[in-house]
Amino acid sequence: MSSVFDSQAFNANLFFPRQDTASTPRNSDDIQVEVGPGVIVHVRRHPSPKAQVSLLFFHGNGEIVSDYDNLAEHFNSLGVELIVTDFRGYGRSSGFPTLRSTLEDAHKVFDQLKSKGKFKDKVCIMGRSLGSAPTLELCAKRSDVTACILESGYADPIPLVERRGLKLDKTTPEEDALFNNSEKIRMVTCPLLIMHGADDVLIFPHEAKLNYDNAGSEMKNLEILQGVGHNDMMMSDSYFISLKRFFDSWSSL
């Protein structure tokens, strides 16, 4: 299927990779996942022996694995073990990122972590902004995902195209099945938390509401955090409170 989502014009203006020059934190577990011939994706696990849940985190655009090194302790304090993965071309990963490759690579990362025993018995997938796409890819298509979290995630892929100066009047059924979060989320049936900043002007809060309304999950929550936008969600006093409440609602079931 030939699609604007596969074009160089779209992907070159969608992704903003940067290299990782930070040192590796002590006690972290760096994992290299081969996602294609000669193409490696870097994953970093922050072990937490007391955690009962693994949190596989897909970061936002322009971010890299090491951006979350100083936040691992906060996530681990919620009773989850943080695992952050890069996209192709980001951080210490090789290759060139495309929206399609992020979806395909998500399965390969998940499979390798699972096969190597890097997961706890329960696995929650979390995606921020652009990371919402691989998150929903896994949560919609895998039965071995326990829960799902979207932070500042998009719903409709057409604005992604239009913000790159390209024209797309409508998406095909094939494109919707792959790239439309608001359609894919209909297949998500696990516990779901959607978090969004009330002041987000990059991805407007109504997209979070659309994802929430369309979600197939019976146990689903929508949290619109006041006083924060797209890139400062963690500054809200409600951010980690909302996450803790969500984890507690299903992790002991």
Image (tube, helix red, strand yellow):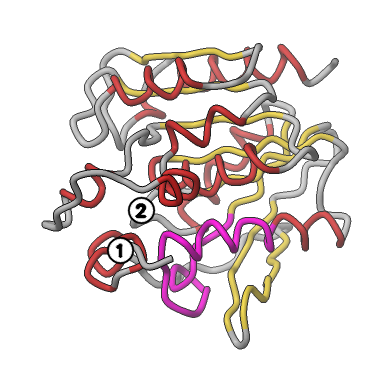
Rendered location of residue 178, percent (x, y):
48, 50
> From the viewer's perspective, is residue 220 above or below residue 122?
above
Judge left or right: residue 37 versus residue 207. right
Q: Quadrant of the N terminus?
A: bottom left
Distance, label 2 to label 1, CA atoms, is: 6 Å
Q: Is residue 142 above or below residue 198?
A: below
| Element at label 1 | loop
Residue hosting label 2: 61
Provide residue 201's location: percent of width, then percent of height. 18, 30
Along the line of sight, which residue is nearer the eye, 244 or 182? 182
Callout 1 environment at 10 Å: few (<14), some (14 to 19), or many (20+)? some
The picture places residue 9, in percent across and down from the top left corner, at 22, 70
Under mark 2, the amino acid is Asn
- Relative image position of residue 127 (x, y in whole percent): 51, 41
| Residue 191's disc number | none
Q: Magenta part of the protein: which range?
A: 85-109
Residue at 54% of width from left, 69% of height from top?
23
Residue that label 1 marks: 16
Q: Which residue is rendered at x = 50% and y = 60% of the image? A: 102
Q: Are marks 2 and 1 in contact (CB under 8 Å)?
A: yes
**Residue type marked 1:** Phe
Occupied quadrant, residue 164:
bottom left
Q: Nearer the viewer, residue 122 or 245?
A: 122
Quarter of the image where the C terminus is located: top right
Q: Residue furthest bottom?
A: 38
Does residue 13 appear left or right of residue 5 in this picture?
Answer: left
- For the residue labelled by badge 2, is the local secondary structure a helix, a strand or a loop? loop
Looking at the image, residue 136 sits to the left or right of residue 59; the answer is right
Quadrant position of residue 217: top right
